[in-house]
């Protein structure tokens, strides 16, 4: 393709499927996120809202639909692993940077290897990986240490959020006569069959873990508070799997950049915690409604949601946010470099010449 085709390639990233818009799902997201915010506000415990809200949101995303026994099992493991990662993230994020790097590599590597157990579980693992990167960034950004990071309370908040969603799905299941239910997010793969991990796939998973770990090392090892967006950008902009299409990979890259710009505008323009909470809710509702409309738009909303959530308690000035955008672009560049290497992994080995 020539440079003259560039506008067409850009337009392809934002092709809209209007039939994929889901207003009901947006309203559901608003409801399950607003009620906990009100309750925690009354109790003066807003600091736990991010963990609670992400617990609800990600458990909802992990619901594969079908028979309730299968749904419960899938949501339960995500709830338990998410609780553990919440405690681990808030604990190590407030401690020595070496532990952050080691745990970041381990979590990202294990997340990638979960592909062995099917696309659905791999997608859930990627969500948990993203949340872990948020969890390590929050205490570091607030200059906390393990005894003040509230890691136990944050873990309990995540668990409560998970239980809320699981309980809601149980009530709906009972009300509908215990019949199988469809997934709230049918766009997310529900394949839970075992998948062989070939050598190229394992190498790609390793490359991804090294890339994310490098970004974590720069942010935490060099004590750069404005670099906390870089690991998130690296993970968000990278191909989900080795065989993911070029179009979807490009949509993830563009989504990460647009999401960073959205977060920057919000954090610079708004200095009220409650308004920022409302922004997170609206971004979550928007992401839920457009997941089937356009993947790049969805990625933009999700990236903006995650990045705003990381800085809810300390919105900063334009200079700080500009630095964060630059580090975000650095994270995207790392992701692009890994995808270039991944392209070489997909190329078939040359057939040796015969005599």
Image (cartoon, helix red, strand yellow):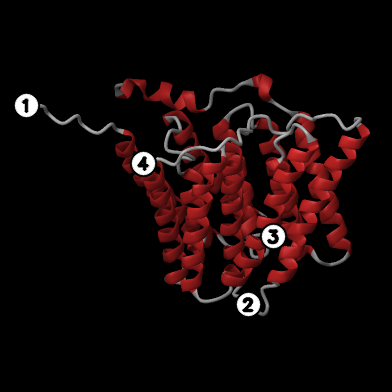
The circle drawn on residue 355 is 1
Q: Callout 2: helix, strand or loop? A: loop
Residue underneath mark 2? 146
Q: Please state which of residues 214 and 290 is positioned toward the viewer in this rendering.
A: 214
- Percent of width and height locating residue 253: 46, 40
Comparing marks 4 and 1, which lies closer to the viewer?
Answer: 1
Q: CA distance from mark 4 to mark 2?
A: 39 Å
Q: Is residue 57 visible?
A: no
- Percent of width and height locating residue 45: 81, 66
Q: Which of marks 1 and 2 precedes in the sequence?
A: 2
Image side of residue 273 versus residue 345, left or right: right
Image side of residue 237 versus residue 17, left or right: left
Q: Callout 4: helix, strand or loop? A: helix
Q: Callout 3: helix, strand or loop? A: helix
The circle drawn on residue 200 is 4
**Around disc 3, counting alpha carbons within 10 Å, would you say few (fewer than 14), some (14 to 19), or many (20 or more)?**
many
Comparing marks 2 and 1, which lies closer to the viewer?
Answer: 1
Q: Please state which of residues 98 and 258 is positioned toward the viewer in this rendering.
A: 98
In this rendering, the answer to whether 191 lies above or below 124 is above
Residue drawn at (48%, 23%) of the image:
12
């Amino acid at each position: 393709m020539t440079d003259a085709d560039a506008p067409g390639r850009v337009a392809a990233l934002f092709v809209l499927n209007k039939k994929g818009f889901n207003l009901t799902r947006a309203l559901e997201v608003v409801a399950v996120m607003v009620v906990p915010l009100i309750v925690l506000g009354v109790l003066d415990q807003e600091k736990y809202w991010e963990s609670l809200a992400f617990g609800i949101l990600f458990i909802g995303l992990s619901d594969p639909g079908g028979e309730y026994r299968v749904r419960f099992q899938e949501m339960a493991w995500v709830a338990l692993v998410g609780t553990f990662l919440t405690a681990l993230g808030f604990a190590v994020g407030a401690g020595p940077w070496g532990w952050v790097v080691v745990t970041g590599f381990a979590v990202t590597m294990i997340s990638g290897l979960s592909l062995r157990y099917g696309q659905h579980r791999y997608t859930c693992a990627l969500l948990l990986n993203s949340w872990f990167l948020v969890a390590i960034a929050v205490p570091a950004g607030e200059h906390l240490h393990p005894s003040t990071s509230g890691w136990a309370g944050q873990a309990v908040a995540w668990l409560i959020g998970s239980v809320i969603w699981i309980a809601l799905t149980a009530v709906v299941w009972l009300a509908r006569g215990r019949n199988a239910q469809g997934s709230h997010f049918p766009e997310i793969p529900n394949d839970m069959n075992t998948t062989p991990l070939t050598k190229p796939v394992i190498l790609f998973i390793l490359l991804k873990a090294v890339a994310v770990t490098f970004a974590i090392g720069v942010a935490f090892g060099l004590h750069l508070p404005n670099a906390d967006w870089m690991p998130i950008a690296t993970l968000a902009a990278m191909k989900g799997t080795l065989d993911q299409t070029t179009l979807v990979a490009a949509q993830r890259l563009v989504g990460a950049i647009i999401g960073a710009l959205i977060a920057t505008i919000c954090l610079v323009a708004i200095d009220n915690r409650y308004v920022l909470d409302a922004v997170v809710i609206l971004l979550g509702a928007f992401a839920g409604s457009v997941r089937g409309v356009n993947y790049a738009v969805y990625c933009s909303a999700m990236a903006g949601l995650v990045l705003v959530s990381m800085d809810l308690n300390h919105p900063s000035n334009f200079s700080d946010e500009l630095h964060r955008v630059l580090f975000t672009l650095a994270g995207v560049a790392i992701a692009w470099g890994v995808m270039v290497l991944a392209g070489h992994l997909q190329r078939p080995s040359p057939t040796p010449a015969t005599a």
